[in-house]
Amino acid sequence: MRRIIPIILALVLVVSVRTSAQDPPTAQKWTNVEWYEVITWYFSDAEEALTLWTEHFLPVVMEVIPEVTCLWFMTGETHITCHFPMPDGPAGMEWRDGPYVVKFNAALAAREGEATTELYERFGNVISRTTNHIALKHTGGM
């Protein structure tokens, strides 16, 4: 009797594995999610970065992409993380320079004029590194 129980359990396991192996998973597209491009800039000079960001870049970001969320971290390494919505989801990555980038560059140039190139250079000089991620936010079921 003791030998029958392990044999029955083994048979049940084999049958269930074979049954599940016959039903491969079906393809599922994400639904009820919002996609974001998350960019983080780390800075070597916090004071210069904060001045450039708040006086020049952030006003244009908020004008062009008002739904963006940017966070200036007050602890740890000095950095800013912005969560840019991707209305087209990952398909938006097909652009070499997306519509938001083009619109941002045009708005910054209109606002800053000839100083635009210098601002990009100064900002680039205070960036020690960047990270870029694609993330999703669940807004309901799947």
Image: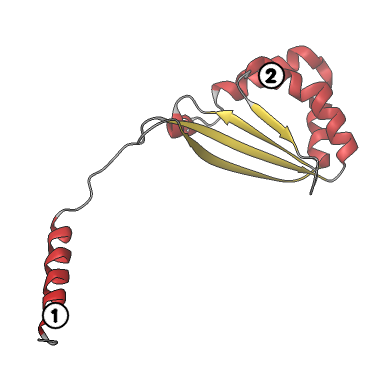
- Name which residue type carries label 2: Met
Q: Nearer the viewer, residue 36 or 121?
A: 36
Picture residue at 54% right of the left edge, 26% below the top: 98
Q: Residue reaching furthest right?
A: 47
Q: Nearer the viewer, residue 141 or 33?
A: 141
Q: Tags 2 and 1 in contact by the CB under 8 Å rule?
A: no
**Tag 1 residue:** 5
In primary-sequence order, the first of circles 2 and 1 is: 1
The reply, left or right, for residue 106 in relation to residue 37 is right
Q: Given the image, on which type of amino acid does mark 1 rest?
A: Ile
Considering only vertical position in the picture, is 57 above or below 15? above
Using the image, tell me which numbered label, if any, was put on residue 62. 2
Q: Position of residue 66 (x, y in %)?
A: 63, 18
Q: Is residue 108 left or right of residue 92?
A: right
What crowding class fits label 2: few (fewer than 14 Cα within 10 Å), some (14-19), or many (20 or more)?
some
The color scheme shown is secondary structure
Q: Which is nearer the eye, 11 or 104?
A: 11
Residue farthest toward the front in the current orientation of the protein: 1
Q: Looking at the picture, how far across and down is residue 116, in whole percent?
A: 79, 22
| Number of numbered discs overlaid on the protein picture | 2
Q: Secondary structure at mark 2?
A: helix
Left/right of residue 21 with respect to residue 83 in the rendered view: left
From the image, state whether disc 2 or disc 1 is nearer to you.
1
Q: Position of residue 83 (x, y in %)?
A: 61, 32
- Image coordinates of residue 111 in percent, x first then y, are 78, 13
The quadrant in which residue 18 appears is: bottom left
SS assignment at label 1: helix
